[in-house]
Image (cartoon, grey):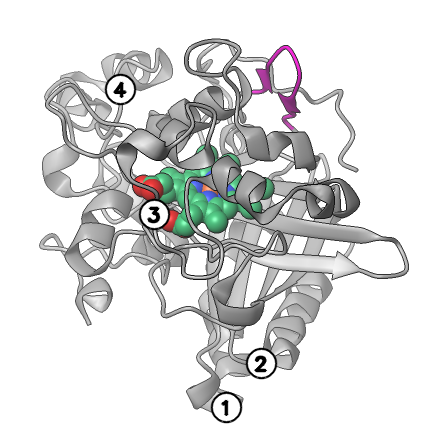
Amino acid sequence: TVWQQAFPDGKSPQRVLVPPSPYAIFLVLTVRPGFESTAKDFLSEIAGLTRTVGFRSREDDLSCVTGIGADLWDRMFTAPRPSDLHPFIEQRGDVHTAPSTPGDLLFHIRARRMDMCFELARLIGDALDGAVDVADEVHGFRYFDERDILGFVDGTENPEDQGAVDAVFLHPDDVAEDSALDSAEAGPDVAAAAAGAGAVPGNGAPGYPGSTYVIVQKYTHDMSGWDELSVEEQEAAFGRHKLSDVEFAEEDKAPNSHLVLNSIEDEDGNDREIVRDNMVFGSVGAEEYGTYFIAYAADVTTTEQMLENMFIGDPVGTYDRILDFSTAVTGGLFFVPSQDFLDDPDGELTEAGLGIGGAASAKVDGPDIDNGSDVDPA
Ligand code: HEM
């Protein structure tokens, strides 16, 4: 399939684009100070562990995508951060807030069976025992007809096939002229300055083809409030019909509907797209009903713009109606390197002329963004 192809320069992406899986575990870990090299060494073991579990039932299609947070990148590598890797940007609207919460490593584990997901999560936990803390762990499942727990079909407008590949993966051509990769020829200082200043916007990450970025947020829902709405009011919140999933005509969509605020274009009028794979989770006893939001994008500013539209509003104050029934309790941004990078980070960094790993001595400051590290995950 198109998403399994290697890129022209031979960099294989991680298995981000897989057919919809009935189960997923989202595991967010923080790495304890002093255990950076343990975490780094573990990166190259993930593929083997995934094969070990997955081979026991190959038809159940176990996959694992690994993401690296901004702080951990700086602690593990001297090489400059990928240009769009920074802590999740908190969105604080007048009414609703998207918090930024701690996270060094993200494991997005998917399979056709929960036991496969769980076994891999367990082995990851065992391997990193003593080196990490679990910041958040969500066991998600696919709900009727691919619906979220609010009752709406979720994922319909995701790009597919080549469109998904283009939306998600950094391509060698995306590397901007003034990127760190190019300026590395001028010396490591120039390269570090270019990348550290966040000088390369959007798709122009400094030389990490086959990689991508991911944003995750755990949402809990006020189900009784939502259920008090009429179906028509619920449909207006999304801009789609509930039963049929048919989209409203453009003129019938409310300005504060989820679809209007999340349909964004670049200056040439092209759709700016992301690939989502949300999952339902919940607990009857805890009266917790949730959506785990996860979105991959080569240009993470696309997802960030959508979040700003939803929480701050577009125009300001016209925030997303679904937030009146949905509370964001976590928020994280991670770099998802190519599989080649994960298998041999130092080798890949050296090949790209970006320095090597090891305890960061000459740290390069990223953009000055509040990482909200004083916010506890719920
Ligand atoms: C569309 C649910 C959060 C971005 C949709 C749709 C549903 C949905 C039901 C319509 C069908 C579809 O195309 O998938 C939810 C729920 C969320 C959530 C329950 C959390 C409580 C987010 C967030 C973002 C986002 C945080 C972006 C940062 C999008 C986009 C679309 C979409 C881009 C497609 C819009 C279009 O082109 O028509 N979502 N979503 N969603 N959502 Fe969300």
Residue 358 visible in this rendered orientation of the protein: no
Which badge, 1 or 4, is on the more N-terminal residue? Answer: 1
Residue 212's place in the image compared with 85, above or below, is below
C-alpha gap between disc 3 and disc 2? 32 Å
Determine the main secondary structure of the stretch shown in magenta. Answer: loop
Q: Is residue 185 above or below residue 21?
A: above
Location of residue 110 in the rendering, given as x and y in whole percent from the top left corner: 51, 68
Q: Which residue is mark 4?
A: 201
Q: Is mark 2 within 8 Å of ligand 1?
A: no
Mark 1 residue type: Ser
Q: Residues within 10 Å of mark 1 (few under 14, many from 20)?
A: few
Q: Decide: marks 4, 2 in contact (CB < 8 A)?
A: no
Camera-near label (4 vs 3) is 3
| Mark 2 residue type | Arg
Q: Earlier in the sequence, mark 4 or mark 2?
A: 2
Q: CA distance from mark 4 to mark 2?
A: 39 Å
**Residue found at x 25% / y 29%:** 206
Could you tell me which secondary element the residue under label 2 belongs to?
loop
Q: Amino acid at mark 4?
A: Pro
Q: Earlier in the sequence, mark 4 or mark 3?
A: 4
Q: Which residue is mark 3?
A: 247
- The disc, 2 or 1, on the residue closer to the chain's N-terminal end is 1
Are the two marked residues, 2 and 1, in contact with CB atoms closer than 8 angstroms? Answer: yes
Marked residue nearer the N-terminal end (3 or 1): 1
In this view, the mark in front (3 or 1): 3
Marks 3 and 1: CB-CB under 8 Å?
A: no
Residue 262 seen in render: yes
Point out the stretch of residues depicted in magenta: 90-100
For ligand 1, the image quadrant comes to top left
**Residue labelled 3 has its Cβ within 8 Å of some atom of ligand 1:** yes
Examine the structure image and report whether residue 96 is included in the region drawn in magenta: yes
Query: Pointer 2: what residue?
Result: 113
